[in-house]
Structures are given as structure tokens and as C-alpha cells.
Image: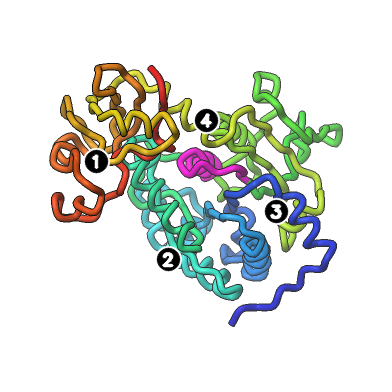
Amino acid sequence: MKKQFTLSKSDTACIKKFFLPYKRIIVKVGSSLLINKDCLKIRNKWLNALSEDISWLQSFKKEIIIVSSGAIALGRSSFGAENKTLNLEENQAAAAIGQIELAYSWKAALEKFNLKCAQILLSPDDTETRRKHLNARATIAKLIEANIIPVINENDTITTSEIKFGDNDRLAARVAQMSSSDLLILLSDIDGLYDKNPHLSEKANHIPKVKEINDDILKMAGSSHYKFSSGGMITKLEAAKISNLSGCKMIICNGEENHAILELAKKRKYTIFEVKDTPLSARKKWIAAGLNFSGRVTVDAGASKALKNGSSLLPAGVIKVDGSFEKGDLIEIFSHNGIKIASGLTSYNSQEIVTIAGKKTYDIKTLLGYVGRDELIHRDDLVLGK
């Protein structure tokens, strides 16, 4: 049964005002907050309070994505490795054990507030390879559309030390880039960026806003002081750089107290990293920066006009396909009179487009044998011009 909201009018006003500019919000939770460092168990009271915060955000029509660490820390005790450094295979085994408990804990906590969630495990290749990037992006979008909260973690059971993200701060930033999120909140054991490590220096000065991540800012980074936390300030600044390039603002704040999101909205101390672009314009720049085109399609006059007016590219408008390319590849779009009008990331490979070119979207299932996307190239994955 859904718990009743306990939010006062003043707290409601605080949350609404603070989060008004943002629609899609990522909440990143680190092991040092989620796990009791003395017994390596979930801090259930803290998690329940955070879940209630998330229910408030959803009630205000915010789209929420959670990036959560904790699987390895939870699996250590079951694996009999509480007090030793784990090698790669032991880390992977601990992650396999702990991931079940981590997923169940999130499910149980969110269900108390009538919220549904789904688990997604990502490896670095899933965010960098365009085909996998598009698939993961589509999955996240479909879950959000269904009002289901994605709970994302790194796939520690199969990644290796050479290729893994290494911390979920950077994973969260990659997810922000992939999902075109507006705000990334890193809940941490520190209330933002300082010019010195505040755990070591009483003269450390807090920095409330960062407009640009330059060498002076990077010099301020320290490291985490929790033994099972893989992140530190340097990883948070690296996450901020990724987030900045994707047009997503990022906040570092202290999340140790219950109702960390509410406390943030009530203007507790934090650091915000500003951006110059919106998520959509940043994504367009990322696509436009692609140097290698894998093929091209030629479209009719009607499709050319529709693209210039901001529409997606549909199968019906395609009259020719050149080159051999795979789903997720960057391809060019030419008008019927040979002028390049756009480029974008394709949702189908070249042979599939040959099959469905000139056909209606409702014919895709019959022609390909499966239900694909309506768009050959979605407008969010398409850039006009040369």
C-alpha cells in the first residue's frame, strides 16, 4: 500500500521551485551512502526516505533515473571477504552476489510509495558503441514513458579492470549523455567542491558554483576516504566534464541525512556545475562531430521538406540506399536532386532499409518479421545541414 505523503506546504514549495527548470533528473547514489560501513548492509531507513523523496519528484511530473552503486560492497560479506582487498575475479563474484540484494532493496523501498522500477546493467561499451547506445537509450525512454524508474548499475560481473568505468560517477554522467537528462545529482559524503580537502584542512573554502572545469578546478580534487567507495572528487569532476558536454547540469551535495533530495531543495550547501547547451543541442553537436559516414540514403521531395521542418525520417520517404552499414551508424541524407540535407544515426541496417524503403511504417513488421521503430532516423538523432 502506498504511504501517505508527509510533505508540508513549505517543503512542497521548496521542491517545486528548486526543480522547476528540470524535467529528467538522474539521482546517483554511492556505496558510502547506501551501505552501512560497519556491517555492510543496506541502510534501509535512509533508502526509504530517499524513495519517498523520489515519489515527491514523480508527483511533480519529473522523470527520474537512478544510478546506484553497492553490489560489490553487499556481496563482500556473503563471499567471506569483508576485510581484504579483492582481486578481479573476487570482485566480479561479489558483484554477482550483491546485485540481487541491491536490486531487491531498491524494488522494496520504491514499492512502499507505489513506484515501479527496472534494473539495467551497463558496461562501458554499451554507452560508446552507437548501436548499443541507441538500444540502451530507447530502453530507458520506454521505461520512463511507462512511468517505471530505471535503476542502473555498472555490470561489474563481466567488466574488467582495463575497461570498466571504475566508478558510478562517470557511469551516471554517461547515462545523462545517453538519456538527454537535464540534471545529474551526485549524492555524496561531501557537500560539494572545496579548494582543499575539508577532511584534512580547516581552511578549505566551499565553491557553490562552477562555470568552467579548468586546471585550477581540477587541482582541487582529492580522493574518497571510504574503503569500499571507488569514487572521489576527481571522478566527480570527470563526471562533470562529461555531463557538461551533454548539456546536463550536475550537482554534488551531501546525501548522508535522511531525505537528501528534500534537504537539497531546502538550499543546503552544494556545488552546481553550469552548462552552456541544452541536452538536445549538445546531442546534436555530438552527432554532427562524427567524421566517418557509413552510407547514405536519398529521399523524395516530401521527405526533404518534412526533415527541414523538424520531422523524423520515415521509410516512406526513402527512394535509394547506398553503402553497407549497421544499426547505429552515422549516415548521410541526400535530397532527390543530389543535395546533402542532413546526417543522423540510423535505426536500421542498410539491407533492412532497402527492404522497407518507400513503405509505410505499419508494413515494417510484415516486411522484416519483427516490430521495429517507426523512424529510420529519429529527429533527436538527426542533424540538418552539411
Write down the residue under mark 1: 316
Write down the residue under mark 3: 255
- Residue furthest out toward the bottom: 1
Mark sitting earlier along the chain (2/4): 2
Q: Main secondary structure of the magenta part?
A: helix
| Alpha carbons under labels 1 and 4: distance apart | 29 Å
Relative placement, left or right, of 82 versus 335 is right
Q: Check disc 2 and give the amino acid type.
A: Ile
Relative placement, left or right, of 249 versus 117 is right
Of circles 4 and 3, which is in front? 4
Query: In terms of image quadrants, where is residue 53?
Result: bottom right
Q: On residue 100, which mark appears?
A: 2
Would you say residue 81 sits in the magenta stretch?
no
Q: Nearer the viewer, residue 175 or 339?
A: 339
Q: Secondary structure at mark 3?
A: loop
Q: Check disc 1 and give the amino acid type.
A: Ala
Query: Number of callouts in the render?
Result: 4
Quarter holding the C terminus is top left
Mark sitting earlier along the chain (1/4): 4
Q: On residue 282, which mark appears?
A: 4
Assess disc 2: are there few (<14), some (14-19) or many (≥20) residues with their C-alpha within 10 Å of its C-alpha: few
The reply to whether discs 1 and 4 touch (Cβ–Cβ < 8 Å) is no
Assess disc 4: are there few (<14), some (14-19) or many (≥20) residues with their C-alpha within 10 Å of its C-alpha: many
Relative placement, left or right, of 312 versus 208 is left
